[in-house]
Every structure is written in structure tokens, then in C-alpha cells.
Image: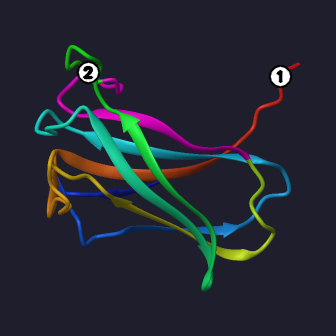
């Protein structure tokens, strides 16, 4: 798993990029990890996730994740101030057998009644990405 750390906020202009070595022969799960602290002001998170190879766009999804329950309790794991949420992007996905696959993540949160995105997403301290092999159940 790879991480990009932030100093308490995620600037809107900063797209998080991860490079994968190569595709996989077997289907995989694409996972996004978000680390937030108590300064995160929302109960959900919107992301735009892209999977690219060179100039070719393989996937582009707008994703919404719940970050807190109805009572405002964070859903992520962790005992101290920072909580980590493991978020599913794609399940059972066949990565193409090419080199230099890139993942690009950006936040797409807006305040209510506003068309403008937020300049800084407060409370996000890290964004991670992992390709997980699917475990066979016997």
C-alpha cells in the first residue's frame, strides 16, 4: 500500500497519484484508504478516481463514501485522533496486463448550496491506495 500524507488538509489542486508496476493475471480489488482527524467537518466524502495507462483512461468513477454514522461517530479504525477508513473502489477488477498504470484521486466535495468545490478539505491527513489480491475461500 502507498500513502500520500497531508498536513491537516487536502488542497483541491493536489491530485494524488499512484503508479502501479504492472497489471495482474488475476482479478483484484482496488482499495482507497483515507486518514482523517476530528477536524474533518463532513459525514461523507466524494472522490473522483481515475485509472490510466499513458493517455488512455481505463476507469473514471465519482465515488461517495460515508465517513461518520448518523450520530457523528467516525466509521474508520483507530484509537487516537486519526481514523483510517478502507474504502472499496472496484471489486473483482481485471487490471490490464500493461506497465505504468496510474491511479489519480481527487476530492470533489462542495458545501451545501454551492457549485464551487472546496479549496482545502480540512481534516484529511492521508490518502492511500492498494491493489489487493482476492483470497480464495475453500
Q: Residue 18, percent across and down?
A: 49, 66
Figure quadrant of the C terminus = top right
Is residue 95 part of the magenta span, yes or no?
no
How packed mark 1 is, by other alpha carbons closer than 10 Å (few <14, some 14-19, many 20 or more), is few
- Name the side, left or right, on which 74 lies relative to 103: left
Residue at 16 percent across and 39 percent down: it is 40
Residues in magenta? 75-92
Which disc is residue 63 wearing?
none
Q: Is residue 112 left or right of residue 79?
A: left
Sequence order check: which comes first, mark 1 or mark 2? 2
Say which of 57 and 5 sits in front. 57
Q: Is residue 110 left or right of residue 98?
A: left
Which residue is disc 1 drawn over?
137
Q: Is residue 38 above or below residue 51?
A: above
Task: Indicate the position of residue 123 as horizontal and vertical percent values.
Answer: 16, 44
Q: Residues within 10 Å of mark 2 (few under 14, many from 20)?
A: few
Dot 2: what SS?
Answer: loop
> Can you name the residue that lies furthest to the top here?
71
User: Residue farthest to the right?
Assistant: 138
Tell me the tag on residue 79: 2
**Residue 67 higher or lower than 47, as above or below:** above
Question: Which residue is outermost to the front?
Answer: 113
Vertical side of 2 occupied by 28: above or below: above
- The answer to which image quadrant residue 39 occupies is top left
Using the image as rendered, state which of residue 69 and residue 1 is in the foreground: 69
Specify whether residue 1 is in view: no
Q: CA distance from mark 1 to mark 2?
A: 31 Å
Query: At numbered mark 1, what does the secondary structure look like: helix, strand or loop?
Result: loop
Amino acid at each position: 500500500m502507498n500513502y500520500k500524507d497531508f498536513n491537516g488538509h487536502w488542497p483541491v489542486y493536489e491530485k494524488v497519484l499512484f503508479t502501479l508496476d504492472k497489471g495482474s493475471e488475476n482479478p483484484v480489488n482496488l482499495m482507497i484508504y483515507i486518514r482523517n482527524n476530528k477536524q474533518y467537518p463532513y459525514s461523507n466524502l466524494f472522490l473522483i478516481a481515475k485509472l490510466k495507462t499513458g493517455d488512455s483512461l481505463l476507469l473514471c468513477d465519482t465515488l461517495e463514501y460515508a465517513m461518520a454514522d448518523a450520530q457523528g461517530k467516525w466509521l474508520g479504525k483507530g484509537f487516537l485522533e486519526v481514523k483510517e477508513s478502507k474504502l472499496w473502489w472496484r471489486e473483482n477488477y481485471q487490471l490490464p496486463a500493461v506497465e505504468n498504470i496510474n491511479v489519480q484521486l481527487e476530492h470533489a466535495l462542495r458545501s451545501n448550496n454551492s457549485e464551487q468545490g472546496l479549496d482545502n478539505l480540512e481534516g484529511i491527513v492521508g490518502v492511500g491506495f492498494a491493489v489487493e489480491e482476492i483470497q480464495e475461500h475453500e
